[in-house]
Image: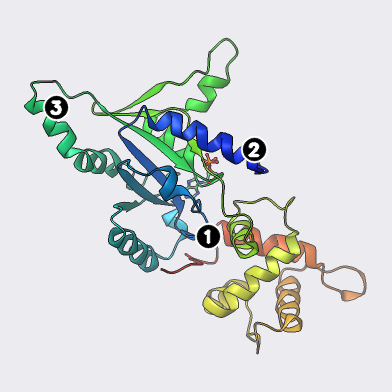
Amino acid sequence: MTIQWFPGHMTRARREIQEKLKLIDIAIELLDARVPLSSRNPMVDEILKGKPRLILLNKADLADARTTEKWRAYFADMGIPSLAIDASTGNRVGEIPVKVRELLHDKIARQIAKGMTPRPVRGLIVGIPNVGKSTLINRLAGRNIAATGDRPGVTKGQQWIKVGTEMELLDTPGILWPKFEDQLVGFKLAMTGAIREQVLNVEDVAYFAIKELAVHYWDELAERFGLTEPPRDPEDNNELVRVMEDIGRKRGCLVSGGRVDLEKASGIILRELRAGNLGRITLESP
Ligand code: GDP
């Protein structure tokens, strides 16, 4: 699914989140651990201003673990605590409610001091499309929330989902838009699979991927596709085409006359990269 973001959409998205912020104690900002900058909304600090916040570096299973730790240190320096998780497997998802309560400890202590029984803390998941918001909500809920709302006759109003006994989540996430006016951001998001091929041409994205991988992860690329000759200059398009053809030949993507089917080769590269078959790859460092 691709969302076209125009100024009207942005204004509406922002207003929707600001309405939801009134209801919650903490905003849980989801980023893609492979591209923590490109998957970050350019205005998120301003939009969430004044709310306690937790950053989740999701899809950590696909990202370089050492770089993910550097990102956590980077956000800690900005005063924002973070966790690295995999929403799809549930790895470390159990730490989220613990961390949230730790961050809201003072607020909870004040309620107790006033003789109140503290109510569950309330959170909102926010993030750009495809970062894993629904997967995480379902994981935290322990059931399939979207499926419930999709049944006819079931009203899909805003509801609180219980996460254990001490935390609740709004069932619909806050959807933010990416920094899509930056072409490099678009290519990185396309490379990780967050933007579908309808928007950017598959071959262009694959060439971008080959260039990035040739510079930062040549060994992984060479190993996966049995390549022996790195591009002499990754800025040279002819060299990138040569690597693409090598990959296509290795995978039998041939058309008449022995030419390589570049579109098919492009599809293979992107599919295997996104599935994590080349290893754990992060495209941005702090
Ligand atoms: P949303 O648009 O933010 O709600 O994103 P979704 O929850 O629909 O997830 C987008 C895609 O990312 C789906 O194919 C998920 O299976 C996948 N996904 C979500 N979390 C993870 C994760 O931790 N690891 C991996 N490998 N894939 C994930």
Left or right, residue 253 beside residue 279 = right
Type of amino acid under label 2: Gly
> What secondary structure is found at the residue carrying circle 1?
loop
- The numbered mark at residue 276 is 1
Q: Nearer the viewer, mark 3 or mark 2?
A: 2
Give 7 or 277, whichever is nearer the viewer. Answer: 7
Q: Residues within 10 Å of mark 3 (few under 14, many from 20)?
A: few
Rendering coords of residue 206 (x, y %): 69, 66
Rendering coords of residue 100 (x, y %): 26, 40
Q: Is residue 196 shown above or below 202?
A: above
Q: CA distance from mark 2 to mark 1?
A: 36 Å
Q: Is mark 1 within 8 Å of ligand 1?
A: yes
Residue 30 visible from this viewpoint: no
Say whether disc 2 or disc 1 marks the residue closer to the N-terminus: 2
Q: Residue at x 43, y 29 (%)?
A: 20
Q: CA distance from mark 3 to mark 1?
A: 46 Å
Please name the residue that numbered disc 3 is placed on: 111
Q: Is mark 3 within 8 Å of ligand 1?
A: no
Say whether disc 3 or disc 1 marks the residue closer to the N-terminus: 3
Q: Nearer the viewer, mark 2 or mark 1?
A: 2
Please name the residue that numbered disc 2 is placed on: 8
Rendering coords of residue 184 (x, y %): 62, 65
Q: Residue at x 62, y 77 (%)?
A: 226
